[in-house]
Image (cartoon, rainbow, N blue to C red):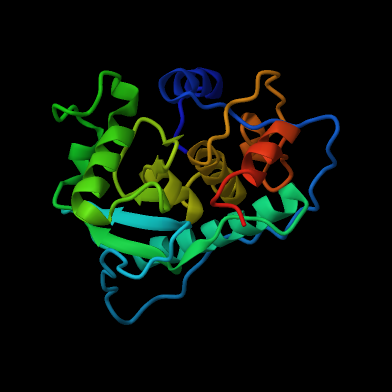
Amino acid sequence: MGRKPILSFLLATSILFGLASCKKSTSTTENTPEPVVPVTSPPSTTAPVFTGPSTTAANLTIRVIYLVPSDRKLNQAYTDAVGVSSSRLATWYKSALGGNKTFHLNTKITETIQSTHAAAWFNANNGNSGTDAQFYFYTNARNDVRAILGSGYDESKYIYMVYVDAAGTTGAGAIGFTAMPENDLLGLTNQMPQPWARWVGGAGHEIGHAFGLPHPANQDPNALMWTGYTLYPNCILNDSDKATLNANKFFY
C-alpha cells in the first residue's frame, strides 16, 4: 500500500479514521493457503476503453474503481490485476470467516473511470483535502469519486474500493471507502520489490477498514488488520473481526 513504517501508519490511520489492523487470535486456526499466482496480461492489440461509472451495480456490493488521472492512460494490465485481486480477497474472506458469507463484487468487477484532475492533484492540498498531509491522497480520491458519481454515490448501498494511478503518501481505508495509490497498481502487476501477494493483502487490510474492522489492540502480527497483510494469504481474522463481519450487511 505504499506505506510509511507500518506502526506509525497504522496508528495514524486508527486515530484519523477510528480503524484498526487485523490480528491473529489464539482461538482461531490458520487459513488454508490459496495458490498465489502473480498477475500477468498478454499484450493487447487494441487500446482499452473506459467503462465509465456503472449504472447497474446491485445494492450491497463492492464497487471496485480504477481511477485514471487526466494525464495518465488507461492500462489494461492494471484493470485486470485489480479485478483478480478483488476476486481473490472475496474468496479469502469467505475462508477466513469459516462459513458461506463474504462480500460481493459488482458484476462489472472493475469500473474504469477518467478523472478531470492530473496525477499531481491527488497528493496535494486542494483546499478541502483535510489537515493531515499524509491523508491528502485519500481525501482527494474520495472527493473526486463523489464528484464523478454525483447522486449515484451512496455508501449505504456500496463499499468503494478505489485504485488511483497517482502517487500518494499511503493507501488508507475508512467506513465505506478505500483508496490505494499507484504503488499498489505497480505491486499488483509485479513492478515492485515486494511479492504480488503482499499487495493483495494490503488491499484486504484497507477494505477491512471499510467494513468497520479496527486495528487490533494486541497487535498480533498474524492478523490481517495489523501487519499480517504482508503474510497474505496466511494471515487471519480474529474473533471480534469475524463477529463484526457476520453482522455487516455487505456480508451475505
In screen coordinates, is 217 left or right of 46? right
Residue 30 vertical position relative to residue 66 in the rendered view, above or below = above
Q: Nearer the viewer, residue 63 or 246?
A: 246
Q: Residue at x 48, y 40 (%)?
A: 210
Q: Position of residue 34 (x, y in %)?
A: 73, 58
Q: Is residue 152 left or right of residue 214?
A: left
Residue 243 lies, in percent from the top left, at 69, 38
When the figure is inspected, residue 134 is found, relative to residue 202, above or below; the finding is above
Image coordinates of residue 142 in percent, x first then y, are 29, 41
Count of numbered marks = 0
Judge whether 139 appears above or below 158 on screen: above
Q: Quadrant of residue 24?
A: top right
Which of the two residues, 61 or 235, is positioned nearer the viewer here? 61
Please indicate whether residue 154 sits to the left or right of residue 207 in the image.
Answer: left
**Could you tell me which quadrant the C terminus lies in?**
bottom right
Residue at left offset 29%, top offset 54%: 67
Q: Relative to 30, is 172 above or below?
A: above
Residue found at the very far bottom of the displayed protein: 45
Residue 127 at x, y percent in the picture: 13, 26
Q: Residue at x 33, y 50 (%)?
A: 154
